[in-house]
Amino acid sequence: MSPTFSSYHFMLARSRPLPSSIPVQPKRTAATSADLAAAITRAASSQTYFTIRYLADRPLVADAYRAYAYFRWVDDLVDQDGVSAARRLAFLERQQDIIARCYRSGWPDELCLQEQLVADLIRGDHETNSGLRTYIEQMMAVMAFDAGRKGRLIGEWELDAYTRALATAVTEALHHFIGHDDISPPDKARYLAVTGAHITHMLRDMVEDTAVGYVNIPREYLETHGLTPTDIHHPAYRDWVRQRAQLARRCFAAGREALARMPNRRRRLAGFAYIGRFELVLDAIEKDDYVLRPDYPERKSKRAALKLGWGLVAGGWYKQPATNYQD
């Protein structure tokens, strides 16, 4: 079965062996597992590492590292060169099966250390309809989509569903690990900040992704305007980039308003910093008149850091919100 959004579901069969040529870590102690999760997170994203370290609820820090590190590992293997499509899909089906079995309390044996990260997460998840479970299931849907889309053009509805799943997953993780017991906005506005971030992320990586077979512009738009995925200088292509950038700006504005009404200051700070990180990319794209490029190193400059810091202060993340949500 091709793991697209239209066919995605968790595998319920007996756990499959790990496909050959997939690198794994041997089993070790729980303490070493937690250390590995923190190390993977720090190597992959300094901002995520320090956000978890300083802003996550203290009892949930180790699990937050596990949550990020597990899907970082899965994503890296899905994207890895030299692994056949058959092995990639077999690996992903094994991960789907492990998660499904763990949520049925059927704890699988013979897990590698990275797989033990998600098993440990689920073992400690005792809440009904928890944000953590939503995160795990939606992120696995994102992984499944990525595994099945390489080398083919994607429809607009699929790309929208991809963004929606990612936004749901990341937002639920933010609310689960930071201010876990605090009230969250009851409407869908809370997903808009991450929606804008994913739109921006796909623009940022467009040139690099296209080169390795992942096309982030809808098939319908390419066909309507007679474009190929590499026509980044074409006026119609640039107009599509402009529309997406403007949509991301609107999502950020609405997402910032939703964050500003949340009572937990640590969550507001994490959310505002997350938005600011991607707004720096939009600044660069707009400055280039919507001609995309392979890299945006200025987003890591000292000037960018100062702008991000000032944006946090000006945004008033530290202020008590005027509106509190009712349960």
Image: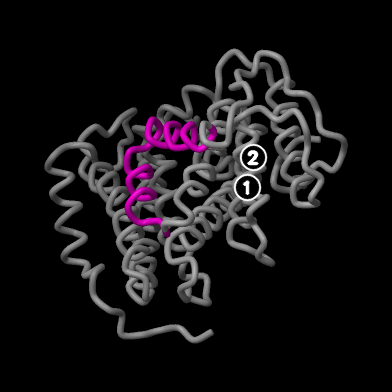
The N terminus is located in which quarter? top right
Dominant secondary structure of the magenta stretch? helix
Query: Which type of secondary structure does the marked residue at label 2 adopt?
Result: helix
Residue at x 51% of width, y 61% of height: 176
CB within 8 Å, label 2 to label 1: yes
Residue 248 or 51: which is nearer the viewer? 51
Image check: 31 left or right of 249? right
Colour logic: one colour
**Residue 2, x across and y down, in percent:** 76, 35
In the structure shown, which secondary structural element does the residue marked by tag 1 occupy? Answer: helix
Q: In the rendered view, does 314 fall on the left or right side of 173?
A: left
Cα distance between the residues tagged 2 and 1: 9 Å
- Residue 192 locus on image (x, y percent): 44, 63
Taking the magenta stretch, the answer to whether it contains residue 88 is no
Amino acid type of the residue tagged 1 in the rendering: Glu
The residue furthest right is 13
Q: Is residue 310 left or right of residue 198?
A: left
Res. 20 mark: none
Percent coordinates x, y for residue 114 in the rendering: 60, 31
Where is mark 1, residue-wise? 158
The image quadrant where one finds the C terminus is: bottom right
Q: Which residue is mark 2?
A: 145
From this view, report whether residue 166 is shown above or below residue 231: below
Residue 260 percent coordinates (x, y): 32, 73
| Bounds of the magenta segment | 33-57
Is 41 a magenta residue? yes
- Whichever of callouts 2 and 1 sits on the residue coming sooner in the sequence is 2
Q: Amino acid at mark 2?
A: Phe
Which residue sits at x=38%, y=35%? 42
Answer with left or right where residue 36 lies relative to residue 158.
left
Residue 229 against residue 134 in the figure, above or below: above
